[in-house]
Amino acid sequence: MDMSVVVKSAWLNMLLQVCFRAGTFLGNAIMLRYISRELLGLVNVRLLLLYSTIVFLSRESFRKSCLSKTDSEKTLKGSKMQLVNLIWLSVVAGIILSFLFCFIWIILLEQPSTQYLKQYHTSCICFACSAIIELTIEPMWIFGQKSGYITSKVILEGIFLIVRSVLSVIVVILMPKYALYGIAMSYLTASIVYATLYFCFFFKVIHSKDNSSGFSNIRDIFPNLVADPFLDKDSTSLVKSFFKQSLLKQFLTEGERYVMTLFRVLSFSQQGVYDVINNLGSLAARFIFMPIEESYYVYFSQALERNVKKYPDSVMKQCCTSLSVVLKFVSLISFIILVFGYGYSYLLLDFSPYHRTTYYYPKADWDSFRDFLRDGPWANVFSLSADKCASYVTSWIQAGMEAFVPSRRCQVKPHSTPWFSPSCAAAISNRNHFFHLFQKNNSLENKRLFIIARNRCKKVLSDAKLHYSQFTKSRILSQKLGSKDFWKIFNSIINKGRSNIPSLIHGTDLITSPKDKAELFAKNFSSNSTLESYGHSLPSIPVKQVDPLLDIQITPASVAKVISQLNSSTACGPDNIPVTVLQNCSPELSSILSKLFNKFFTESCFPACWKMASVVPIFKNSGENSDPSNYRPISLLSVISKVFEFLVHKFLTSHLESNKLLSDNQCGFRSSRSTADLLTAVTERFYCALDGGGEARAIALDISKAFDKAWHAGLLHKLASYGVSGKVFEIIKSFFSNRFIKVILEGQHTSLFPVTSGVPQGSILGPVLLLIYINDLPDNLSSKVALFADDSTLYSCLDKKSSLFDRLEQAADLESDLTSVIDWGSQWLVNFNSNKTQLFTAKNYCNMVNIPILMNGNPLTESSSNPSSWIIAYY
């Protein structure tokens, strides 16, 4: 074979790979607007691995064996028939491997979620059939490669890849709910087109005047069953040898996909992201090294025969020169990649837009959705474990949303204004279109059209603003407007909405990308929710003599009542199931969920799928917004999980209130109590002291990360002392174990991080559990205590003008109480921050010297505010 043919083959193969990979990335970018990452991972990892395994293992050893034969051996008619027979054995091998691997993929491997399960089984068969059809062109591919039909081969493969990619994109856009079916059929159709084009091309070559393929009839490329011998012995032995190499090469090439498929180390969604990153990392190998390896293998296999021991010096010199050129070129490319690839490859990942799936619930087919829920295989589902039961119910509801609720992938624009409507976007697009036309051709007609479009755009924008203003005004004047809606409107008017988180400062590093910011927040939140409690013994506490709370029976009516009371604007959790779906399907779901919740109590298990929270960082409105420690984690939990928590919360608070177990000083998160009650009681006590000529002193305690640092073992110990036992106790214990968080920020989400302490902020049970944890704080204090959740204030009042001795005694009592508070904190692993703890003194006589109060040996900071403003600001 001429060296120029080899170079041409390598160059055209490189060009084909570049076009193919660029088309693949473009296709994935388009498809991601219409399908989920889970589906993309299922196709690009699981199904394409099935396809590549069948194709590669079936044909690679036969290709190498046939290309290793010398030209002199292939001139005989008998040898050519034996070679064709050998090549067609790759199709037989493909059929056998298809049955084997389809059985493994469909039966033995872990299956996708319910919404994709039926499509997945059919798709496995389609991908296997596609691989078998592609194997039928092997005789023509091998003889075309040897005969020098390089350009034609690249054109045919290019058409095959274009048809496959275009069809996949089209079916995904037109039928996103059946995207898996569509992609599988696209691969099958493209393989049929590919095989048909190859047969047509060879038919034309065989009947042309300059036929160099060695065939005189189209029947010659099919197996000859009467050939004697049927196979060439040497070629068959080479197939066995090359098959071992093929196994190793396939594992080295697709090893990470086999690990993900066989051991399920990543979810399908994570596999989709990994596949994109892996393709970016292997661009050089796919663009350059693979085409060079394929092309030069053909050259060297033809230039050097296996059974010849000595060659002329000219042949050896040419081969050595060719090998030297290949090695230098590959080494040069490798060094370029090592120098520039690491530093700049990450830029390719920043081009991904931020999209999300939105559902249009007013157009949902609720009747069909309810029928779908009623017809579920619930008898079989509830025979599974509680964990699997919860996962199946979640997947079934998600499948119903996909089937009966219209949805679309849309780009998120954080800075868009509330009045900006689709008609505004269309008007701006129309104006820009005529502006570009006017720029290209500066004619009077184009100028007139541009002016008309510009004026219309201004009118559409002004009308949209006016309509939004009138709508906002009518809402403000409406008597049904609540305080929450009022402040939401007010913040939107003054442009104080939720803005993007700015660049963060971590040590000496400036964190700018959303992915890096999310990772930093996740690590920070996870470390804040980690408590060093190993070896710390539980304090002894008295057991309350009350009737125990052992078990809870949940009825469909109680579930339906909770669902009806849910706020429809509640954010979705990681499962993306909204309150709207639960409320519109309440009769069907109430029965299903009541059985599910009772199963949790039967098995004393809180499901693992509800222990994973999507966390959103919220700025505390204090300190620098570039400091990640000035953000609090708000957990977005499953709405179904919240329904269950509401029911447990109802029985738990009833038990606590009916037995008067909660401190009477606590006003936070309790029915019929609020900050107004606390402020009224405290300010009345303060003003009574001031009216009598006395003074009042208050200490606002600061608990460091109270929600994040609650000690689980200590909290469970207190629950047991309050009579919470049996299955309810085990459920709450399971609620705390093996919890994980992932941070979501600007369309990016992190991997899972463990949480070993604290109560989830955003959960229903979290606040009441925190109240239980700090409930005994006032027990051993002589001063008055005002509690609102974790905000604690010690205060002491002197009702008349007192002597220095009385005031010293008051200060001593407060210091003693502070010591008791610190001792209580060391027992229960609660940290009180003395630097942020503030002291306030209210008095009418300016000549009275304030007596300092010490905490941990340091004087507390005096606040200069007046009593009302200070207390109101604090609470």
Image (cartoon, rainbow, N blue to C red):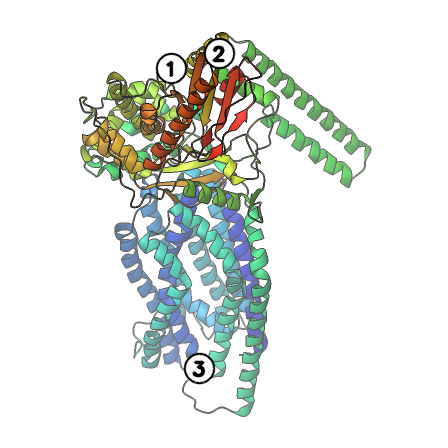
Mark 1: which secondary structure?
loop
Residue underneath mark 2: 801
Residue 157 horizontal side relative to residue 579, left or right: right
Q: Nearer the viewer, mark 2 or mark 3?
A: 2
Dividing the picture into quadrants, the one containing residue 114 is top left
Name the kind of residue labelled 2 in the image. Lys
Identify the disc placed on residue 70: 3
In the rendered image of this protein, does residue 804 appear above or below residue 101?
above
The residue that mark 1 highlights is: 673
Whichever of labels 3 and 1 marks the residue nearer the N terminus, that label is: 3
Question: Residue 436, position in %: x, y?
Answer: 73, 38
Query: Mark 2: few, some, or many residues within 10 Å (few <14, many ≥20)?
Result: some
Marks 3 and 1, how far apart in space? Answer: 93 Å
* Chain-order first, disc 2 or disc 1: 1
- Tell which of 801 and 517 is nearer to you: 801
Residue 215: percent from the left, percent from the top? 44, 73
Q: Are marks 2 and 3 in contact (CB under 8 Å)?
A: no
- At label 1, counting other C-alpha atoms closer than 10 Å, the crowd grade (few under 14, some 14-19, many 20 or more) is few
Instruction: State the CA–CA distance, disc 2 to disc 3.
Output: 115 Å
Going from N to C along the chain, the mark reached first, 2 or 3, is 3
Q: Nearer the viewer, mark 2 or mark 1?
A: 2
Residue 475's x, y, as percent? 54, 13
Amino acid tagged 1: Arg
What residue sits 55% from the left and 42% below the top? 353
- Above or below, 152 relative to 801: below
